[in-house]
Image (cartoon, rainbow, N blue to C red):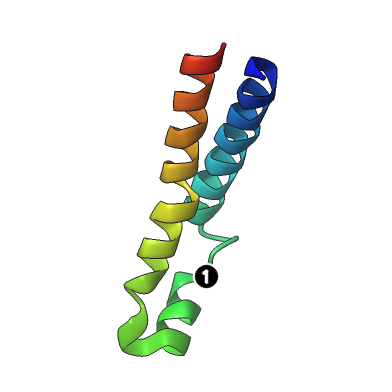
Amino acid sequence: MHTMFATLGMILAVAGLVVSVAFWIPGLCNRTRLKEILGSRYPLVYVVYVANGPMLLLLGVILLIFFR
């Protein structure tokens, strides 16, 4: 059971890191285009980013710490 959670933690940490890095590379995420499309709802992009980037990374690291 510990191995399964440790593996899940590693997967979540890597996924969170990839999303975080991809969001901040200018060529991969065209924020000006997103701002045009979403208009006043543009701040939701940051909510989705935080939920899928740093939070996944944090959850993965917590799982790795507790189940290693």
Q: Quadrant of the N terminus?
A: top right
* Identity of the residue drawn at 59% across and 37% down: 12
For residue 18, what is the image quadrant?
top right
Residue 59 to residue 38: above or below: above
Q: Amino acid at mark 1?
A: Asn
Q: Which residue is mark 1?
A: 30
Q: Quadrant of the C terminus?
A: top right
Specify the farthest residue to the front: 1
Compared across the picture, whether 36 is left or right of 11 comes to left
Residue 3 to residue 43: above or below: above
Image coordinates of residue 46 in percent, x first then y, are: 37, 63
**Residue placed most toward the observer, 48 or 36:** 48
Tally of numbered discs:
1
For residue 7, what is the image quadrant?
top right
* Identity of the residue drawn at 61% across and 34% down: 14
**Residue placed most toward the observer, 67 or 48:** 67
* Identity of the residue drawn at 47% across and 16% down: 66
Circle 1: is it few (<14), some (14-19), or many (20+) Cα within 10 Å?
A: few
Compared across the picture, whether 37 is left or right of 46 comes to right
* Identity of the residue drawn at 49% across and 46% down: 20
Image coordinates of residue 37 in percent, x first then y, are: 47, 88
Q: Secondary structure at mark 1?
A: loop
Image coordinates of residue 2 in percent, x first then y, are: 63, 16
Image coordinates of residue 3 in percent, x first then y, are: 68, 17
**Residue placed most toward the observer, 42 or 25:** 42
